[in-house]
Image: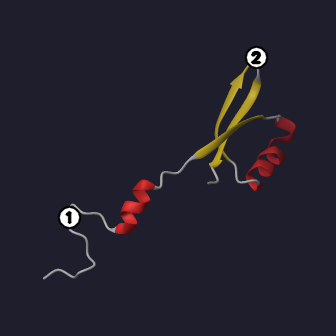
Amino acid sequence: MRPQNQATKNQPTDSVSQEVNAVQKWEYATVPLISHALQEILNQWGEEGWELVQVVESQATGTTGYLKRPKES
């Protein structure tokens, strides 16, 4: 006999169902990265909840950081 609160193989529990329905939304930002102040720039954005996800170097625009953080509901 199976306990009452245990989900069957094909039926998710309520908490799993809620997690599937709650998709994380993100906001994004781009920031120019200046080599002589790189750590200061990234630490400031990090204090505000931003995470660096990519850096792109271009002759036209210089070095750009792409950041993301969870979007507030």
Q: Which residue occupies 64% across, 49% down?
A: 69
Q: Quadrant of residue 47?
A: bottom right
Between 29 and 19, the residue placed more toward the observer is 19
Q: Which mark is residue 60?
A: 2
Q: Is residue 42 left or right of residue 21?
A: right
Q: Position of residue 8 (x, y in %)?
A: 20, 68
Which SS class for mark 2? loop
Residue 43: percent from left, percent from top: 78, 51
Residue occupying the point 37% across, 63% down:
16
Looking at the picture, does residue 56 appear above or below residue 9? above
For the N terminus, give its image quadrant: bottom left
Is the residue marked by circle 1 packed among few (<14), some (14-19), or many (20+) residues within 10 Å? few
- The amino acid type of the residue labelled 2 equals Ala
Name the amino acid type tagged 1.
Lys
Left or right relative to 66: residue 2: left
Q: Position of residue 65 (x, y in %)?
A: 71, 36
Q: Residue furthest left?
A: 1
Label 1 sits on a secondary structure element that is: loop
Seen at 77% across and 24% down, the residue is 62
Q: Residue under label 1, please give it.
A: 9
